[in-house]
């Protein structure tokens, strides 16, 4: 069974209508499901197919940062697409007034641990893996390690936590710092 994990990309519909910052970000590719490529690096083609793992942190992600101990031991492997289900996009749908206000965060130690494991992608069902003041630094740190953050995933509730699956990722390089993506997960029946 294949699940679409992507929100639509559109330059015509800014995140918050009338917000010039959001309109500019949308023109740079920061709309819908996208990856942040702050440093402008080329994304390796072999990243189109990855082993995927879901880590469900929805029970506590509103109240504290995701710590390394929250990850199942020996679960994440080199080359993985690690997805975090926080529930943020369900609580505050994309484009809603609450969407900009809610912050979920992976602790810096968690990000560093994932990068040391050699993951390809860190995906999240929210607008960032760190709050606004750390957003750019977190994305740059990942990109320097040849890993990319994919934001605004959806339908993560359809995926099994604790059991690997196959992920297909396609990106559309429009030359901006945000790269629109299409992400699908294939689950063995």
Image: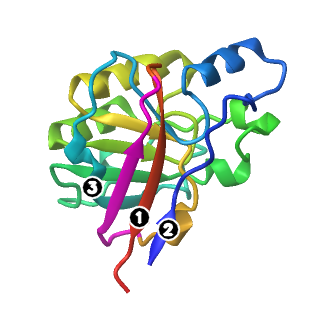
State which tag comes first along the sequence, 2 or 3. Answer: 2
In this orientation, does residue 161 appear? yes
In this image, 76 relative to 100: left or right?
left
- Asked whether 180 falls inside the magenta stretch, the response is no
In this image, 166 relative to 179: left or right?
left
Residue drawn at the location 24% of the way across and 52% of the way down:
80
Q: Residues within 10 Å of mark 2 (few under 14, many from 20)?
A: some
Q: Is residue 172 above or below residue 155?
A: above
Q: Position of residue 99 (x, y in %)?
A: 71, 37
In front: 20, or 92? 20
Q: Which residues are magenta?
A: 161-174
Residue 185 tag number: 1
* In contact (CB < 8 Å): disc 1 and disc 2: yes
Q: Is residue 44 above or below residue 159?
A: above
- Asked whether 162 falls inside the magenta stretch, the response is yes
Residue drawn at the location 63% of the way across and 48% of the way down:
88
State which tag comes first along the sequence, 1 or 2. Answer: 2
Write down the residue under mark 3. 49
In front: 143, or 55? 143
Q: Is residue 84 above or below residue 15?
A: below
Q: Position of residue 181 (x, y in %)?
A: 47, 42
Q: Quadrant of residue 114?
A: top left
State which tag comes first along the sequence, 3 or 1. Answer: 3
Q: Position of residue 63 (x, y in %)?
A: 59, 43
In front: 124, or 65? 124
Write down the residue under mark 2. 3
* In contact (CB < 8 Å): disc 3 and disc 1: no
């Amino acid at each position: 069974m294949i699940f679409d994990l992507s929100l639509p990309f559109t330059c015509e519909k800014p995140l918050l209508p009338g917000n010039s910052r959001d309109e500019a970000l949308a023109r740079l590719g920061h709309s819908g499901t996208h990856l942040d490529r702050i440093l402008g690096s080329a994304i390796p083609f072999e990243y189109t197919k990855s082993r995927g793992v879901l880590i469900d942190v929805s029970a506590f992600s509103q109240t504290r940062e995701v710590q390394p101990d929250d990850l199942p031991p020996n679960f994440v492997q080199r080359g993985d697409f690690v997805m975090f289900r926080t529930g943020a996009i369900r609580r505050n749908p994309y484009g809603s007034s609450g969407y900009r206000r809610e912050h979920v965060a992976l602790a810096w130690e968690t990000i560093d641990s994932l990068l040391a494991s050699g993951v390809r992608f860190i995906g999240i069902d929210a607008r960032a893996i760190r709050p606004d003041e750390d957003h750019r630094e977190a994305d740059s740190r990942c990109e320097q390690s040849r890993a990319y953050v994919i934001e605004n995933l959806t339908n993560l509730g359809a995926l099994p936590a604790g059991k690997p699956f196959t992920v297909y990722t396609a990106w559309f390089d429009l030359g901006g710092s945000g790269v629109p993506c299409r992400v699908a997960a294939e689950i063995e029946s």
